[in-house]
Image (cartoon, rainbow, N blue to C red):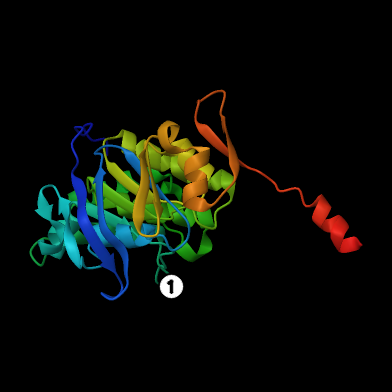
Amino acid sequence: MTRGVASDTHRLRARDLTAGYTRATPIIDALSLDVPAGALTVLIGPNGCGKSTLLKAMARVLPAWSGAVMLNGQDVHEMPTRAVARQMALLPQGPIAPEGLTVAELVAQGRFPHQTLLRQWSRQDARAVKEAMAAAGVTDFADRRISDLSGGQRQRCWIAMTLAQETEIVLLDEPTTFLDLRVQVEVMGLLRAVAREGRTLVIVLHELNVAAAFADRLVMMRDGAIVAAGTAAEIFTEDNLKTVFDLDARILHDPESGRPVCIPRVPDIGPAIARAAE
């Protein structure tokens, strides 16, 4: 499933994008973002800041009240659904598989955009499913039911389904939620490998240090707007963490990778305890 490395163009762009769940209260307003091709972009920000809304609007799940999302030069909201699905895949937060579905059956659903009434299951579909399961490390689970797997194993299966769609662009909304740190690192390592093959990934994450460790490009959001965008070295700073998250923290750097690491400052509660005891 290896692809040629993408050029340094932007195949996915948001231009003055306003979107939300009601026109009266947009979540993101006149937001613009260029997503670098062939890289792993991570969106971070406090709850309710618009990360998932932006992802859904780019994937055409939510309408654009104004502005546009451009996919390879076309307005994504004016393209046929199947045409979008052949170029861009979305893995939403907390997907649920039908009861009794096996891993192979789930991953095969990723081939739906490539099938029509005249073109049903093919050797190309079988190859794509086989390669996606191998890339996600779930081949050994092919005949097991999704419900019988651990959280990390299930998440790898969902990622395999998304990879089987064989799109150049992959959007993932919090793919590491509820996973322990070791499994988060494994999943992010898999996604980084996918980006290194030339695909364009946009991922919403909550874990700040995981985001800083794996992102090629970080986008910090607050109140429906982009506060900062760039590499982790450029924007993962004490000032930005205070502005975006209202978080008092120190930034250290990993001695091996050089990546920034956030260390929250713990307030001294000793005097407050002493006063309460008086």
10 Å crowding of disc 1: few (<14), some (14-19), many (20+): few
Q: Looking at this rendering, what residue extends furthest in the top direction?
A: 256
Q: Is residue 65 left or right of residue 43?
A: left
Q: Residue furthest left?
A: 118
Residue 52: which quarter of the image? bottom left
Task: Kindly give the residue lying farthest to the right in the view shown.
Answer: 278
Residue 127 coordinates in the image, percent (x, y): 25, 46
Q: Is residue 148 visible?
A: yes
- The answer to whether residue 272 is above or below residue 213 is below
The residue depicted at 26 percent of the width and 39 percent of the height is 36
- In front here: 150 or 22? 22
Quarter containing the C terminus: bottom right
Dot 1 corresponds to which residue? 99
Place of residue 185 in the rendered image (x, y in percent of width and height, measured from the top left): 51, 42
Return the x and y of residue 242 as percentages of the image width and height. 52, 47
Residue at x 51%, y 33% (from the top left corner): 260
Q: Amino acid at mark 1?
A: Glu
Looking at the picture, how far across and down is residue 162, in whole percent? 31, 53
**Residue 120 visible in the current orientation:** no
Element marked by disc 1: loop
Quarter of image, res 92: bottom left
The N terminus: image quadrant:
top left
Q: Residue at x 18, y 64 (%)?
A: 66
Work out whether 181 lies above or below 85: above
Q: Decide which of 88, 140 is in the foreground and name it.
A: 88
Taking the image as shown, residue 68 lies to the left or right of residue 27, namely: left
